[in-house]
Every structure is written in structure tokens, then in C-alpha cells.
Amino acid sequence: MFKTIVYFDKERVAQYAALLKNEKNMQLKNVKIRDHKTIGGKVPVIHGEHEKYEEYAGEILENNLSDCDEFEKLLEKRMEGDYFDFTEQDYDFETLPRSSIIKFESSIEIPEGFDMMHIINDFRPQIIAAIAEIENKDIITSILGKKTTKIPINFIIKNEKNILGFSKINSNNLCVDIETIEEGEYDSAIVIAKFKSKKRVEGEEVVFDVMKDLFSMNRALRKQSGNAKIEGMENIIIAKDYFSLEILAIYE
């Protein structure tokens, strides 16, 4: 019951939850509470003549744990065959419908090649300051000045075949320090994800491109830079078949 939320994509989960409930997704910006005190529910009591109204301006606090629980309960009620709980019984991954939601137990691993990328990301402000005099500063600053980045994650889906899953998660949705994941503290986590597709790999496939995924450079900018590489930073590759996933929640 008392889970530790590692990752939670609250916007995507809210969208899917609204779909499951057949409701519009509404984001509350401000909440006001009015307190109308009366005797017997009929007679105002302040000074014998005036009603008392107390008004509070506040925000509803986010509760990822509660939202995750609610989402799982909604999924469990599905009868359409688009939700599969691999923690309860085995299913054939080969026949999974695309865009179905799956729940599974897995280890979580950030590929070693991302270590240096994470360091560079931490030092973006210093990098921006260092290139202040460079021509095309605005372009470089727009690339390095982003407050979020994608993080590559490997999942070993625990079943007879130990299937490999891969995703690029949004750093803004992390609920723990990335270092705890890098140190392998979550080797038996529960993952809720949307199954995107099975990728069949012949030889090697680049699954995380430094320029595109870390620095968010579009195709035109990558071409303009001559597809330059940063020394010590290699693209991340996978050399076997894997499942492409969109991660909604991770907890243990």
C-alpha cells in the first residue's frame, strides 16, 4: 500500500484516467472554500444579523501515490483486453496489442553511456556562461538551456525469457534522485507502461542519440552542425530485439 514512487507521468496518467472514466481532463488552478456557519442550517449567527463567510485561496496538493493507486484500480476494471498485468499471470508478449497498458516487475538500469551525459546536463548553466561570446549564442543557449531532458532506461521484464524493454523517460517526472537509479537501488520495481512496439534489431540500433535526445537538436540543426559528436559521449545502442515502451509509473 505504501509505495515509493520512482517515476510518475502525471499528465499522461491524467489523460488516460479521464479516458477510462469517460470524463474531460480538468486541471484545477485555484480553489476557494466558503464556510457558511448557521444554526440548524437555517439561521446566520454572526452578530445575530450577518452571515459569516470565510474564504480561503489555496491549491490542491499533488499526491502521486494516490493518483497512481486510482489509475491502477481503473485499469483493473477494464474488460476490453487492453490491460495486461504480468505480475498476476503470464501473457504472450509476442501477441500484445500495440498501445495496450501493461504492468510488470522489472529491474531498472540507466545505460552506462548516460553517466557523462548526466554530468554535462548538470553543468549546463556553466556551459552557457562559457559560450556567451560565441556566434549563434541564441541557438546554443536554446539547446543547453532546457530544464528537462530525456533519460534512457533499460528494463529487464522478469519472466521466463527476461525480455528487454527500453524507454526514454522525461527527467521532470522523476520522483527520486537519478543517482539512486544509477546505483541500482531499484532492481525489483513495478512498472506501468504503454506498449508501443516490438523492435527487431539486425546488428545494432541507435536508441538514444546524444544530439537529438539530450540536446533536443532538430534535424536541421544536426545537419548544420555536421552531426558533430561530443568527445567521450557516444550514442546508446541496442544489439538485440527489444520492446519499446512509454513509461507511466514506476514504484516499489
Image (spheres, rainbow, N blue to C red):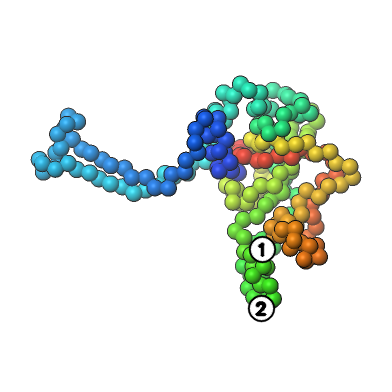
Residue in front for this viewpoint, 28 or 107? 28
Q: CA distance from mark 2 to mark 1?
A: 16 Å
Which amino acid, by three-letter code, is at mark 2?
Glu
Residue displayed at 59% across by 24% down? 78
Q: Is residue 152 above or below residue 2?
A: below
**Mark drawn on residue 109:** none
Which residue sits furthest top? 79
| Secondary element type, mark 2 | loop
On the question of residue 107 being in view, the answer is: no
Q: Is residue 11 above or below residue 96?
A: below
Could you say where residue 64 lies in the image, as x and y percent from the top left? 52, 41
The residue where tag 1 is placed is 143
**Mark drawn on residue 133:** 2
Residue in front for this viewpoint, 92 or 15? 15
Residue displayed at 64% across by 67% down? 141
Residue displayed at 64% across by 65% down? 142
Could you say where residue 159 lies in the image, as x and y percent from the top left? 75, 29
- Mark 2, residues whose alpha carbon is within 10 Å: few (<14), some, or many (≥20)? few
Q: Is residue 182 above or below residue 159?
A: below
Q: Earlier in the sequence, mark 2 or mark 1?
A: 2
